[in-house]
Image (tube, grey):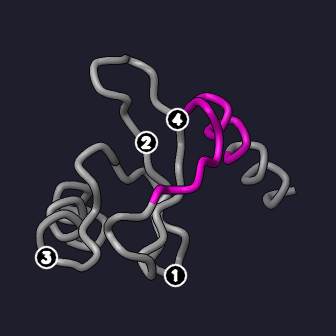
Amino acid sequence: DTPPFLDVTVALDRERNHLQPSLARSLLPIMRDGGGGLYCLRSRGAELHFDVVFWDHERDSEQVPELVTPDFGTWLLAQLRELDSNSS
């Protein structure tokens, strides 16, 4: 069983429906920053392209999330390289 704090569906429901500011529907959390902020995939309507943005939980729900990388692959590669360098 997955602990509730690691369950993606539980976390997403909590971020969208129970916390303020609520997470925009166009954002899908992929990683926490350890302080309440979220790295998210941001959809652009009907496009099948997702960039990675940072959602700051201390700002209001009208915030424009900060662009981290223009595509998920670039972000994921950077995360894997960081993990690899930290394990050496």
> Dot 4, how many residues are within 10 Å of its Cα: few (below 14), some (14-19), or many (20+)?
some
User: Where is the N terminus found, in terms of image quarters?
Assistant: bottom left
Name which residue lies at 58% across and 30% down. 71
* Residue 23 placement: quadrant: bottom left
Give me the C-alpha separation between circle 3 and circle 2: 20 Å
Name which residue lies at 42% across and 64% down. 63
Q: Position of residue 70 (x, y in %)?
A: 62, 32
Vertical placement of residue 33 versus 49, above or below: below
Element class at badge 3: loop
Q: Position of residue 15 (x, y in %)?
A: 24, 68
Q: Are marks 1 and 4 in contact (CB under 8 Å)?
A: no
Element class at badge 1: loop
Give me the C-alpha separation between circle 2 and circle 4: 6 Å
In primary-sequence order, the first of circles 2 and 4 is 2
Of 26 and 1, which appears nearest the observer? 26
In primary-sequence order, the first of circles 4 and 3 is 3
Where is mark 1, residue-wise? 35
Vertical placement of residue 40 versus 60, above or below: above
In primary-sequence order, the first of circles 1 and 2 is 1
Q: Which residues are magenta?
A: 64-79
**In magenta stretch: residue 84:** no
Q: Amino acid at mark 4?
A: Asp
Vertical placement of residue 34 versus 41, above or below: below
Give me the C-alpha separation between circle 4 and circle 3: 25 Å
Q: Nearer the viewer, mark 3 or mark 1?
A: 3
Where is mark 2, residue-wise? 41
What number is the disc on residue 51?
Answer: 4
Q: Are marks 1 and 2 in contact (CB under 8 Å)?
A: no
Q: Amino acid at mark 2?
A: Leu
Name which residue lies at 29% across and 43% down. 26
Q: Are marks 2 and 4 in contact (CB under 8 Å)?
A: yes
